Amino acid sequence: MTDPDLYFKDVTLLVTHYNRSRSLERLLNTFRHLGMTFGDIVVSDDGSRPEHLEKLQDMQSNYNYRLVTTPKNRGLGNNINKGQDAVQTPYTLYVQEDFEPKEIFAAHFKDALHFFETDAELDIARFYAYFKYPYTKPYNKGFSEMRFSASPFKNNHLKFYVYSDHPHLRRSTFLQKFGRYPEGIKGDLTEYRMALSFIQHKGKGIFFDKFTDLFYQKNSSDEPSTMGRASWRESKNPLALTARAIYLQFKLLKWTYDVLFKKV
């Protein structure tokens, strides 16, 4: 029986997927285990291999989702755009298929949804990150508001990550306010361009302070991450660390210029 307190009729769970059907099944099964149900579920597939697409079609009747497909891989931007286009509820919980909610997620998700219903200016609530957003002020119930500033005195380059493709709640009018995701470019650049638009259009977002407490990110050996990073950016070699420091200062200057002068 569905728990009425965990039925979110105004929310669509939007999951983007590419060649990781086992991960998708684990994600959906975990939401079921938590007792969380939604007004709708949309799975947007980015041209997965036939064996994964067949698995997605087999799982539809069990998890009752709508499957949105494309005949060939078109990249992250297209996958999110077509998935979001299919959403028909006021709010969207966006999750990539390699994440898994933890036991306490439901309670904090209820808080975030309540904030959206009472704060008309709120555009995004972020539930996971690799690092803490550097400039915040307390919001409510373990969330903080992200405060972007182009000031050179706020010189932490992480300030540009007000938007992230990690799990978050947003209004389903997100694309109308901030524009569609750019297509035909790499995933990290797609994410950056959306963050840039979010800043330029004065988006308001909140960030869960204990940002690793709500989701696991699971990359199994049989379904590894499809995103990669340059090895020198991860190295602890002194020469690589020096190169990284110079790179980050250049990035800070370039991104500040983009925010102030480059329209997306």
Image (cartoon, rainbow, N blue to C red):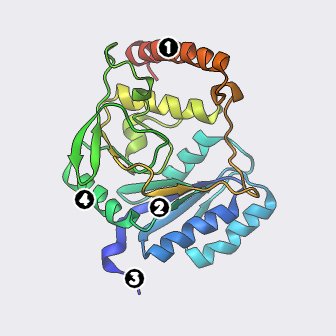
Q: Secondary structure at mark 3?
A: loop
Of badges 1 and 3, the one in the foreground is 1
Q: Which residue is mark 1?
A: 249
* Residue type for callout 3: Thr
Q: Which label number is shown at residue 62?
A: none
Of callouts 1 and 3, the N-terminal one: 3
Of callouts 3 and 2, the N-terminal one: 3
Q: Kindly check if marks 4 and 2 are in contact, taking CB atoms under 8 A apart as contact.
A: no
Q: Kindly check if marks 1 and 3 are in contact, taking CB atoms under 8 A apart as contact.
A: no
* Residue type for callout 2: Leu
Of badges 1 and 4, the one in the foreground is 1
Residue shown at the point (46%, 44%) measured from the top left: 129
* Residue type for callout 4: His
Q: Position of residue 136 (x, y in %)?
A: 28, 35
Residue shown at the point (40%, 63%) measured from the top left: 105
Q: Kindly check if marks 3 and 2 are in contact, taking CB atoms under 8 A apart as contact.
A: no
Q: Which label number is shown at residue 114?
A: 4
Q: Which label number is shown at residue 2?
A: 3
Label 3 – label 2 distance at C-alpha: 16 Å
Q: Position of residue 74 (x, y in %)?
A: 68, 42
Q: Secondary structure at mark 2?
A: strand
Neighbour tally class for label 1: few under 14, some 14-19, many 20 plus, Cα within 10 Å? some
Q: Kindly check if marks 3 and 4 are in contact, taking CB atoms under 8 A apart as contact.
A: no
Residue shown at the point (74%, 51%) measured from the top left: 71
Does residue 63 appear to the left or right of 75 in the view shown?
Answer: left
Q: Which residue is mark 2?
A: 13
Label 4 – label 2 distance at C-alpha: 17 Å
